[in-house]
Image: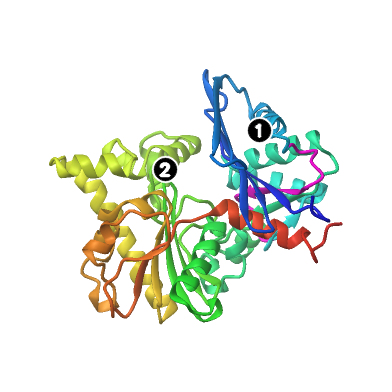
Amino acid sequence: MSASPTRVLVLNSGSSSVKYQLLDMRDESRLATGLVERIGERTSRVEHTLLTGAEPETRTREGRVADHDEALDAVAAELSRDGLGLDSPELLAVGHRIVHGGRLFDGPTRVDWHVEREIERLVPVAPLHNPAGLAGIRTARRLNPSLPQVAVFDTAFHAHMPEAASRYALDTAVAEAHRIRRYGAHGTSHAYVSRATAELLGRPYEETNTIVLHLGNGASAAAVRGGRSVDTSMGLTPLEGLVMGTRSGDIDPAVVFHLMRNASMSAEDVDVLLNKKSGLYGLCGDNDMREITRRADEGDRTARLAFDVYVHRLRKYIGAYTAVLGRVDALVFTAGVGENSALVRAAAVEGLTGFGLAVDPERNAVREKRPRVISPEGTPVTVAVVPTDEELEIARQTYGLLGEGGDRG
């Protein structure tokens, strides 16, 4: 046993799932990982993998998990079964992914009653995610009241964007009274990927300019100058910006008024439309890029349109963020679509040689889990694929706050 605790349990609580990882921060090794999914549905699934042996050992069970409290109880039970429970003296803290931290939180923060209250106050701008994060915090406290907990906010990486990027052109008094500004999201991913990209290029992080495209079911772009976010596509909420799986991304605000006045839609109806029935799903009835590209290849015109709209929006942001940064060292793709769709990557930079962007077809076709360059030798801007690792970033920030030399309170 080490002289002081070095393990961090990372909880990533979504609206209907909990992902978790237990890491030893001495070498950033994973001791266990797992997932509880379909929370609240008739049949839920718990998958736990122990990684301390010669070979991974996975246990899976199905049965209803009613809510996040039960999900966290299941996580704790699986860890305890392997001698890695929340009462372990080697466990330093629990690190929680919290989507929205508003303007108050610009870094990892130890959770107390004040922090918890602020997270709850921000539920209206992250209604699917902040309640799940709160449930993780409260259940972990119930299971071990003395165990430190740290909130790592998706918005924190973007907290110091220039005012020109973060402010909307709204009446100032209204904006300030209701805390309306661009907060962004996916900050842990953008932080991890931009830093890993600098390492891939062999450049100091503080001297590297990157455009990061986090392309999953939720998607966002970020312009990162020397390790600091200077612009990002998501705004007050995660609805703004790129075309996403079920979210519209950028849209004329007057569309909302038009639907309310002429389609007899309520504010709630429009909210559901823009967040859950739009994006790729709204355009072609599918939000899985693999299925969309398959359909497009077979001549499905709605799937082809969805793909083209998706890529057109990507290209607009690549051009805009090239202008914002002035000099771009790397364009980086990450997350599920970004890491796995060679078609999206190729289409996103097609015709952008004037921006110094191109992909090598053979390099782009390679499927690997390590960071890799996919642009030809000698291109002015490196195009890369860097797998994201939000859980490791959360663990690093948690350990940095509470570990050796940190504030363990």
Secondary structure at badge 2 equals helix
Decide if residue 1 is on the left or right side of residue 156.
Answer: right
Residue 103 at x, y percent in the picture? 66, 61
The tag on residue 274 is 2
What is the CA distance from the residue labelled 1 to the residue labelled 2?
Answer: 33 Å
**Given the image, on which type of amino acid does mark 2 rest?**
Leu
Q: Position of residue 57 (x, y in %)?
A: 56, 34
Q: Classify residue 93 as left or right of residue 221.
A: right
Residue 38 at x, y percent in the picture: 52, 28
Residue visible at 62% across and 22% down?
A: 66
Q: Position of residue 246 (x, y in %)?
A: 39, 41
Q: Residue at x 36, y 35 (%)?
A: 263
Q: Secondary structure at mark 1?
A: helix
Lower sequence index among marks 1 and 2: 1
| Residue at position x 66%, y 30% in the image | 78
Residue 140: quadrant of the picture:
top right
Q: Does 211 sit above or below residue 16?
A: below
Residue 196 located within the stretch drawn in magenta: no
Name the residue rendered at 84%, 39% in the picture: 145
Q: Quickly name the residue at label 1.
A: 75
Is 101 one of the magenta-colored residues? yes
Tell me: 65 left or right of 26. left
Which region shows up in magenta?
85-103
- Display coloring: rainbow
